[in-house]
Image: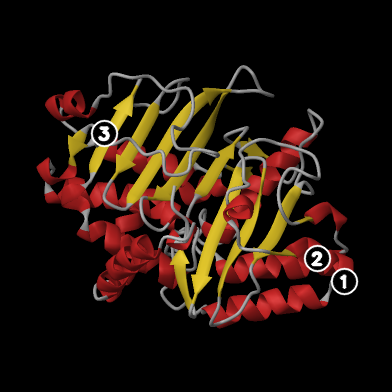
Amino acid sequence: MHSNNAHRRSMGRWKRAGLALSVTTALLGGAVYAATANATSEAGSSSSSTESSVSTEATTSVSDVVAAADAFLATLDEDQQAEVLLDFTEENATAWSNLPCGSSCRPGIELGSLSDDQLAAAKAVLKAATGTGTGTGYDQISQILAADDVLGETASGYGSDIYFLAFLGTPSADGTWQLHFGGHHLAVNLTYADGAVEGVSPFFIGVEPTSWTDDDGTSYAPLSGMRDGLLDMLDSLSSSQLSEAQLSASYSDVLVGPGEDGDFPETKEGLAVSELSDDQQELVLNAIAPWVEVADDTSAASVLSAYESELDETYIAYSGGTGLDATGNYVRIDGPGVWIEFVCQNGLVYQNQIHYHTVFRDHDTDYGGEFSF
């Protein structure tokens, strides 16, 4: 069912946050992302290490995303368009997973079925809709697909061809619709309504191997910015704060993953961010940023501003160790809106290594707040 009350609550929060957008945009281009900049050299991007994490000059709008979507649809025949253009239903919207699978596991058209021109047009949609930061947004998505190609060299059932793109509802600058994209270790759900971004989650992302070097000598570590931001946040805590932040339960995977829509814990656990110093609170905001940057730069800044305004009601927590380097290490950020989990699992293909799973959700704006769970 549609949840108009949740939708109004969430958009009120985002619109209030927009008042602080210019401040957050300045943060996005500055020292707030020093930790992310340190990871740039690992991420395999050709961009200069002095480049800011998010371009403050980006002006992508919903109309740009719609134009790219229309251009992609124009490359498809009638049968292909039927695979891409689907109803915006709860069943379709929630049909994402972290698992690899065959051609029938997710809504949409499989990238491997597209011609070179069609694939380029599909990627142009993703590029228009997602962030421009180094190691985040489109750059990070591209690296996750590359990681699956690495896995495909060792095991069957993996590869960048086995990802699916769908438009749930018809792309338009004034209607309600969702860009739905994903495959193994990736789920991107960006919801649009009335010419604005209504929701930038759920966003699931994982990676195995966590880092690698290609034949050209370029090194990749797609989740290093996320991991390093959490490490900086945890490293800033005193022993008493660490004790308060520690969870009694242990975690082998994310708690609110695929198929767990709306299943947030009733009580927030861990250390209240309100108890932290200003510098520590800034590190919490830094840690949140790489997840929201899956969205276009302007929307990401607005969402981050909303989460900044809610820091006093936000909690951070961890389980296992704090190094994010061993199976069972787990970190959570839980606010009125934001929900982020990051967990280390044992490798499945590279069994002598760990690999990462992480999910970003919003208590109100998952799927644009269009459904009740």
Name the residue type under label 3.
Asp
In this view of the protein, which residue sits in the foreground, 92 or 124?
A: 92
- Which mark is on residue 82? 2
In the image, is residue 223 above or below residue 85?
above
Question: How many numbered discs?
Answer: 3
In the image, is residue 320 above or below residue 310?
above
CB-based contact (under 8 Å), mark 1 and mark 2: yes
Q: Residues within 10 Å of mark 2 (few under 14, many from 20)?
A: some
In the image, is residue 123 above or below residue 336?
below
Q: Residues within 10 Å of mark 1 (few under 14, many from 20)?
A: few
Name the residue type under label 2.
Ala
Q: CA distance from mark 1 to mark 2?
A: 6 Å
Q: Secondary structure at mark 1?
A: helix
Q: Which residue is mark 3?
A: 235
Q: CA distance from mark 3 to mark 2?
A: 50 Å
Quarter-wise, where is residue 155 in the image?
A: top right
In this view of the protein, which residue sits in the foreground, 193 or 55?
A: 193
- Judging from the image, the colouring scheme is secondary structure
Can residue 153 be seen here? The reply is: yes
The x, y position of residue 114, in whole percent, is 85, 60
- Which mark is on residue 78? 1
Q: Secondary structure at mark 2?
A: helix
Quarter-wise, where is residue 264 in the image?
A: top left
The x, y position of residue 108, in whole percent, is 74, 56
Q: Nearer the viewer, mark 1 or mark 3?
A: 1
Q: Earlier in the sequence, mark 3 or mark 2?
A: 2
Q: Secondary structure at mark 3?
A: helix
